[in-house]
Image: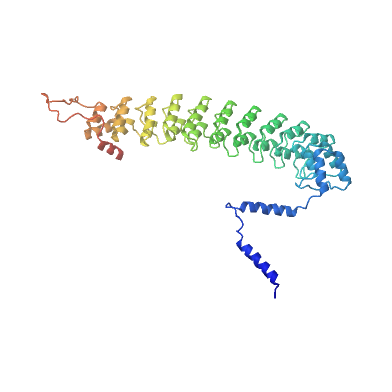
Amino acid sequence: MGNPQQDANAGDHATASSDSPPPYTSPTSTTQANRFSFFKSLKSGFRSKPDPLVSALCHAAMRGDEQQVSGLISQGANVHGRNEDGDTPIKCAILQDQAGTSRLLLSMGATTNKLPPLFKAASVGSLNVSKMLLDSGEDVNEVSKSGDLCFIEVVNKGNVAGVRFLLEHGARADASTLAGGSVLAQAVKKDQVDIVHALLEYGADVNSHDVHGNSVLNIAIQTGNAKQVKLLLEKGAQTKPATILCTTILEYTINKKRLDILRQLIAAGVDLGLADAQNQPILIKVIRNPVLKKDDKLEVLRMLIDNGADFDATDITFGLPTICHAVETASPEIVEELLIRGAETKVRMLGGQTMVTYSIDVNHRNHVKTLLSHGVDVNEVDGLNRTPLMLAILRLDFNMAKLFMDHGADPMADVNESAVKFIKTLKRRDFLEVLGLTEEPRIPRVMGGSSAGPSTTEGHAPDVPPPSYEGAAGKA
């Protein structure tokens, strides 16, 4: 049998437990906190508790107290040990730029991981330690175990002061990795403008490449850093080499819609006559670019033409001039810009049409008006033996026929004979009047009473066709 007193105590404890409220649980998810606690516990489980002597040694090293460092080491403090943050005494001394304690610890056998002490110090900007190590005979062009110069890793770390210090003391600014990419290319790719400036100042090749063959200028354009692009151009970066995508730097910049960088390239004298791998002139590439918006196209077009791009250039594939590509794909504003610049208009589209007859075929009425307003020949016969007026008549498009007549179309031209016969057969007085082919003048309608003259029941012919004609024109 159990002890009655123990049973009573157990009963009281159970009652108290059942009566107590459940522990408070945060309404937010604790998954992230649990994950953090798990990894923290896991990490602390693998790390042994720091030796008090090592912790004291680290603090003394950070303060630069050489006497205490010597005393702690003589008492058995481990120079390879780690403090509560996982740092070694030499790392603590370097981070605080303590040259004296760094020298003392190194003389006692302390070592740094990954990078030799000189480059470790330079990578964190500890220049006092760096100078001490150089004075003690460290090699500024030391090679790492991987075979690359240790200096390259310092550049990757991004400390400008450390990089400049090593360059001032003989580090190679034109260094390359084992894979073949220049250290300058790496700095450009990381957007380290100040380091790029330092490398160029100490003789880095401004036309070097990365491991894939991209020039440093092209890499800078990829990063979109206009300041970096300007610096490279000022230092003589070549704009002619193509990218690894077989496009010119100019085209690549336009595709990226970096008009600020485009202005810099133009100011630097980039060749606007360069073509891509398909030998397509740059203006045609801009006009046919599916990414650029209309306003961007117009701005780029003006920028290029203002700086000497040939607005009459022809593509290598079909021999079509620039304006034909504009008529095919662009807005009337693009066509008008080329016409204002003086683009040749006696040209043929791929199917033999003139620009006007092509625009009628594809129902680009705005192009028609733009072309006519800039003096394109309204009577020019295309390769299919058609004139604009003929097409308007055959389509029963009164407004377009009137537009062509207003711009000097000749209905009596031989090529228009069949179209005129067609409209006469239909007895469309409105068309005949606008074409000037009526045999007698119209009798005006008499308003407000009868007339002694001939009957006017036929009425006044309208200036525009009724809706039924427009429907017929659409079907035609």
Q: Residue furthest right?
A: 74
Tell me the quarter of the picture where residue 143 sits.
top right
Drawn side of residue 388 relative to residue 292, left or right: left
| Quarter of the C terminus within the rendering | top left
Q: Residue furthest left?
A: 452
The residue that appears at 70% across and 54% down in the rendered structure is 41
Which of these two is toward me, 213 or 464? 464
Number of numbered tags placed on the structure image:
0
Does residue 111 appear in this view? no
Does residue 326 appear in this view? yes
Which of these two is toward me, 191 or 141? 191
The residue that appears at 80% across and 46% down in the rendered structure is 55
In the rendered view, tell whether residue 266 sits above or below residue 185.
Answer: above
Which of these two is toward me, 90 or 149? 90
The residue that appears at 71% across and 54% down in the rendered structure is 42
Tell me the quarter of the picture where residue 225 sits.
top right
Residue 288: where, in percent of width, then height?
48, 36
Drawn side of residue 59 relative to residue 273, left or right: right
Asked which colour scheme the image uses, the reply is rainbow
Residue 186: where, in percent of width, then height?
67, 38
Drawn side of residue 315 relative to residue 159, left or right: left
Residue 284: where, in percent of width, then height?
49, 33
Tell me the quarter of the picture where residue 346 sits.
top left
| Quarter of the N terminus within the rendering | bottom right
Drawn side of residue 339 relative to residue 250, left or right: left
Residue 473: where, in percent of width, then height?
29, 37
